Image: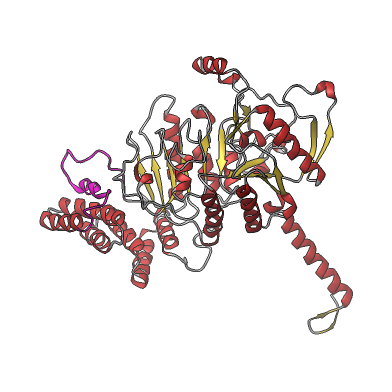
Amino acid sequence: MRTKGPGVLESRDARLFSLALALLACAARADDPALRTVVLANRRVPESVELARHYMQARGIPADRLCALDLPAGETLMREVYEVRLRDPLLAFLRERRLIEQVRRPSDSVRRHESEWQTLSTSIRYVVSMYGVPVRIADTRWRIGEAIANRLRRFDLKDAAAVDSELALLLNADYPIRGPYPNPLFNQMNEADAPPSAALILIAARLDGPDAATVRRMIDDARTAEARGLEGRAYVDGRGLAHGSYALGDFWLSEAAERLLREGLDVVQDSAEPVWGPAFPMEQAAVYLGWYNENATGPFLQPGFRFEPGAVAYHIHSTSAEKLRTPAEHWTGPLLAAGASASMGCVGEPLLNLTPHLSVFIDRLCRGLTFGESAYLAQPVLSWQVTVVGDPLYRPFRHVPGEESAPATDWARARAVNQLVRAGRFNIGLGLCRRWLAETGSPILREKLAELYARNDLFPEAAEEYRAVAEQAATADTAVRAGALALRILRVLNRTTEADALEQTLRGRWKDSVVLPWLETGRLEEDAPAESPSLTPGS
């Protein structure tokens, strides 16, 4: 390339170079999922429109992508109302803005409940329904017929569905509404690998929950977590089922736990039948997966319990989102009220094998895909019972520890240590943990060092580090969790006098704490409580 002087391009070449840069920038911007997103709000609910604008500004979604419709204010709407007041106006909105290309179908080919429009192409991939948009579509059958069919387990006759799951098929004109519809995105590694039949499948999710304040916090926390990385532990609460049709749920959970371990997270896993009780010391939770109880219970109902910003939480149950806008009933609403940013739930009986396959869901999240992509790649069927609650553009694992020269936070350092140990570089991980602990004094890293000592059979050193964590703890959960491990190791070492003194100290300091009974897991007697999952993460 010729120049007029050192570093000075000729004007024509400079213009071409600038144009090339501009085209590259436009191409990169065209791949931005925000430009492929439409936001749906209920104009009858003022908070719905306000939250929509807040979300769109946070994500950089163009202002003309807000579709505010006149919808019922409750959680349920009838099928005819869905078609006339939600589906058809939304399609018209997309056509008017040339976000989709459609042609009208011959009237004699349109059956009841079908759309009059055939989709030729779309530039939209995500539809986000805001707080105030109904959650479920009621069944069209008479109640008595619905009850008889359910009793006979004829779920192929069911046409009740989650609004999200129905909106996923918005651009498909002629699918049957009765029973589940196969999802062509299911179990694909990403959207690019999906078959051509997936081209018109939308990723439909909702920013919804117990109240408007919760939804605003969900939006903001997802952005915070993306910027700094998802921080905290993963908790996986299984049932220990190895046989029968319900063993599938435990298989998903164990595979998800293993995938999170590979990602470097500290994973606390339980395989006992009862769900965790109120004495379970759960804190700093970034991921929660579990089953099977009708209503949220245990640590989630503790007054001081809060998930970490950006946390992903899901509980397998047939009615986990039967009511969504509640902080106390079922699971999805209470998990969001407790600080989670993303969840899923069932608005009606889904059948276990037709719910999100958690092994797929967690794997795709860990690969850096969005929450919405991961949720839909994990669902075997659509036009069914699952509602996806959270920012679908949120990528919890966008920030990968180790991308920077040195991890920036204590949780990122702990993940880096875990990954080194898992890769067979134990001594390097141990050395880094010691060094970072000396530099920061972090209780997170001290507890990690204690775990590494225990795994290397350095039990006296492990006991001292766990004891230091327990004695210096700022919360009862930390004190009791680390204290129970210190007590058990001290008693294995026959240092019972020290163990008894530590237990007395902890019981005195945290005498009013609901988690104090967990100290009993530090005993060696055979009659110790059965609810004692591994609290040594990363194992």
Q: Quadrant of the N terminus?
A: bottom right
**Image quadrant in which you'd find residue 94:** top right
The secondary structure that dominates the magenta segment is loop
Residue at the farthest right position? 12
**Image quadrant in which you'd find residue 299:** top left
Residue at image location 72% in from the left, 37% down from the top: 200
Question: Percent position (x, y) of residue 374?
Answer: 57, 43
Of residues 416 and 30, the one nearer the viewer is 30
Of residues 304 and 395, the one nearer the viewer is 304
Classify residue 392 as left or right of residue 4: left
**Image quadrant in which you'd find residue 398:** bottom right
Residue at image location 18% in from the left, 46% down from the top: 523
Question: Percent position (x, y) of residue 20?
Answer: 81, 65
User: In this rendering, is residue 92 above or below 64?
Assistant: above
Whether residue 200 appears in magenta in the rendering, the answer is no
Residue at the farthest bottom position? 5
Residue at image location 42% in from the left, 60% down from the top: 411
Of residues 90 and 232, the one nearer the viewer is 90
Question: Percent position (x, y) of residue 198?
Answer: 69, 36
Of residues 280 and 31, the one nearer the viewer is 280
Whether residue 520 appears in magenta in the rendering, the answer is yes
Question: Percent position (x, y) of residue 240?
Answer: 35, 33
Residue at the farthest left position? 497
Question: What range of the chain is rendered magenta?
Answer: 509-535
